[in-house]
Image: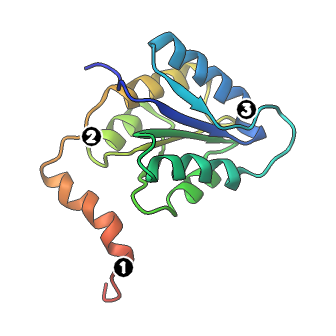
């Protein structure tokens, strides 16, 4: 399997800035184009702004995939998953990255700088980029993710 050829949107708050910069070098090393939408320093900013920018970039179809980073990854994943069509996955292990793509067709990878060592982040990124959606029985479930928010009788 080879990494996607499409351009990826990436963003972080100040608590994810160093990891974002590291991930950008990994993307460069892999020959994957990316657009950094900020933040551009370790000065304090609010994670919802940057996670939303990543999610909107993917939800609009301008980017096929995105990467959102904050301190723990929790806030960024909560924000990104508010957007229709976004399947953001906070991945802290290689297996989580693999299943997020194979079973959930995750289109936004979320990382937490404070909880993810660089060597693990590199492995998670590579797997998340290389794995493909299996479809089949998982397709029905992925469609339910967007449909379920519109149902009143669960």
* Mark 3, secondary structure of its residue: helix
- Identify the residue at the far top of this view: 29
Q: Earlier in the sequence, mark 1 or mark 2?
A: 2
Whole-angstrom CA distance, mark 1 to mark 2, is 25 Å
Up-down: is 67 above or below 53? above
Residue occupied by mark 2: 102
Please provide percent x and percent y for residue 100.
36, 43
**Measuring 33% from the left and 74% from the top, which residue is drawn there?**
148
**Residue 151 versus residue 93 in the image, above or below:** below
Decide: few, some or many residues near mark 1? Use Cα within 10 Å; few <14, some 14-19, many ≥20: few
- Front position among marks 1 and 2: 1
> Residue 27's x, y, as percent?
51, 19
Q: Position of residue 75 (x, y in %)?
A: 64, 54
- Residue at 67% x, 34% y is 113
Say above or below: 102 vs 143: above
Q: Please identify the quadrant where the C terminus is shown.
A: bottom left
Check contact, mark 1 vs mark 2: CB within 8 A. no
Q: What residue does disc 1 label?
A: 150
Q: Which mark is residue 17?
A: 3
- The quadrant of the picture occupied by the N terminus is top left
Q: Residue at x 24, y 60 (%)?
A: 141
Q: Residues within 10 Å of mark 2 (few under 14, many from 20)?
A: some
- Occupied quadrant, residue 62: top left
- For the residue labelled by badge 1, is the local secondary structure a helix, a strand or a loop? helix
Residue in the foreground of this view, choosing between 84 and 20:
84
| Disc 2 element | helix
Q: 87 left or right of 51?
A: left
């Amino acid at each position: 399997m080879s990494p996607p050829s499409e351009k990826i949107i990436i963003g972080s708050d100040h608590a994810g800035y160093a990891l974002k910069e590291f991930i950008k070098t990994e993307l460069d090393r892999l020959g994957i184009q990316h657009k950094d939408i900020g933040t551009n320093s370790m000065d304090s900013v609010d994670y919802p702004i940057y996670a939303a920018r990543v999610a909107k970039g993917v939800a609009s179809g301008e980017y096929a995939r995105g990467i959102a980073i904050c301190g723990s990854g929790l806030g960024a994943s909560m924000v990104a998953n508010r957007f229709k069509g976004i399947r953001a996955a906070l991945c802290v292990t290689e297996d989580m990255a693999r299943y997020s793509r194979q079973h959930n067709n995750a289109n936004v990878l979320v990382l937490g700088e404070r909880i993810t060592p660089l060597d693990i982040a590199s492995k998670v990124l590579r797997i998340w980029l290389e794995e493909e959606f299996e479809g089949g029985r998982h397709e029905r479930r992925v469609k339910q993710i967007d449909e379920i928010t519109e149902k009143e009788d669960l």
